Image (tube, grey):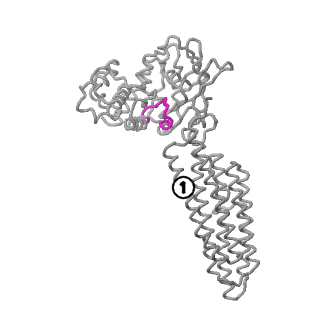
Amino acid sequence: MADAVRVHYQEELERLEASALDGLNLVNAALDRTLEAVQHQDVELAQIVVADDDRIDGRYLEVHQSLITLLATQSPVATDLRLISALLHVLKNIERMGDQCVNVCKLIPLSGNEPPADQEMVELILNMGKQTRTLNSQAQRAFAERDIEMARDLVRQDDVVDNLNRECFRLALAIGDDADKREWAMTMMLAARAIERIGDNAVDIGEQVAFVVTGLFREFEDASHPSA
Amino acid sequence: MTHEDEAQVGRDAREAAASRAGIAVRPEEFQHRAGGTREKVFELNGIDVHYDGVAAVKGIAMDIHRNDVTALIGPSGCGKSTLLRCLNRMNDLIPAAEVSGELLYHGEDLYGPTVDPVQVRKLIGMVFQKPNPFPKSIYDNVAFGPRILGEKENLDSKVEQALRGAALWDEVKDRLADNAFGLSGGQQQRLCIARCIAVSPDVILMDEPCSALDPISTGKIEDLMIELKEEFSIVIVTHNMQQAARVSDRTAFLMVELDATEQNRWGRLVEYDETEKIFTNPTDKRTEDYVSGKVG
């Protein structure tokens, strides 16, 4: 076998993968601040998260453009082509995760400076956030290591987040007749829903891992045809 | 002449050519596009080629299907052209070349004792890397094959059909008497394709047909291949992997194999599959490395 060729192209592709996956670190940093803002009703911190989302969007645009350039100039095929296709998906997932953090942070001023917070519901949301953070890190590692089993395990972890989300819903229903409390609970329901969507995006990244490795795209779980 | 009539003329000519070549071909073998069946044109079983006793390719086993474009790819010296030349007995012209193994053409032994290699080459035409028109007029280039075969009736019509088939007619219809060397490289290559299809072959072999052409001419030849496969079966050797990806239905990847002393080298078929599979998710790591340009 001859010496390796197209070294610069390979290095560029590796650099872009690392840069795309590093987007998940940006998401986790945004998520940490989001949870802190929820916990302390910190409107200023929430505004910082909204402003900082430009960094995640910027990462998306930068890596996306570089991947398109590689497609145009290097005619990638086989595993390289699957990797680039997967990275384009993953970038979109990461960008959406950042937007969901923004969605939560935009809700915080709506709930007021001293809201009639239900501590149990706040704890549930913080717990969801921690679980989701773990999902993001696991998706990142599964992609970097091309580990399908680790990727598939994301579904199990995401079920935990989904259950916490349902629990939030149950608490919101049972919050009582006070109008302010109900308004606060409805707002927190939306926040829980946004965090739950971040977990779904992590599972989508796991599906892209399976595509890169096997060449076949299969949803791990089909929402429209759930398994019995 | 209607399209149906032309198709029948083509079938008749091919049957006559097969008969001249000493190949007993069943009429149904020449039915045009037999309902998308995976009819085999060539079946190669354990083909070895030696030059002066030195192996050039070893153990090639593959089926080549009707109305497919089949691409042979691989690094230099892996035996792609050698293999292509086996398919119309062109290696017979090299005294030291020796082909062993079984090579069936429509189920008949192509190297059988009664088969006439000259007639085989009329049935299985070849287009080369460098356009090689004869130093004659455009018309005479295309009319050359039919004249040799004594098919002098409707010669004008045959020449027109062949030039139309090679997507060249509109460009040359007003200057058929001009010397073929006055054409551009891309036009000359299409003229060679017209010359090849004028004798109604069954298979067209192409040995890097676009490597001497500019991108526009290359695009025209590639479009032409996709049209021609409706009627013919095409086997193409190419160094341009994107060309293989664009035009072929199936792709065979060959690579060089060395013996323990690393003194002797020969070509070996590594992977043969649907082109889409080869370029999106090949089975063999060596194919992957080659098509993605990681090794030469």
* Quadrant position of residue A174: bottom right
Residue in the foreground of this view, choosing between A97 and A153: A97
How many labels, in total?
1
Position of residue B220 relative to residue A226, above or below, is: above
Question: Where residue B154 sits in the image (x, y, percent)?
Answer: 27, 26
Q: Determine which residue is flagged by label 1.
A: A62
Residue in the foreground of this view, choosing between B12 and B38: B38
Near mark 1 (Cα within 10 A), the count class, few <14, some 14-19 or many ≥20, is some
Image side of residue B283 versus residue B19, left or right: right
Question: Where residue B41 sits in the image (x, y, percent)?
Answer: 51, 28
Image side of residue A149 versus residue B16, left or right: right
- Whether residue B237 appears in magenta in the rendering, the answer is yes
Residue B35 makes an appearance in the image: yes
Residue in the foreground of this view, choosing between B12 and B269: B269
Which residues are the magenta region? B229-244
Position of residue B241 relative to residue B259, above or below, is: below
Residue drawn at (33%, 31%) of the image: B187
Position of residue A91 relative to residue A76, above or below, is: below
- Whether residue A43 appears in magenta in the rendering, the answer is no
Residue in the foreground of this view, choosing between B227 and A208: A208
Question: Where residue B249 sits in the image (x, y, percent)?
Answer: 51, 37
Q: Amino acid at mark 1?
A: Glu
* Quadrant position of residue B199: top left
Residue B235 makes an appearance in the image: no
* Quadrant position of residue A93: bottom right
In which chain is the residue bearing label 1? A
Image side of residue A53 versus residue B133, left or right: right
Residue drawn at (64%, 77%) of the image: A43
Position of residue B169 relative to residue B141, above or below, is: below
Question: Where residue B281 sits in the image (x, y, percent)?
Answer: 60, 42
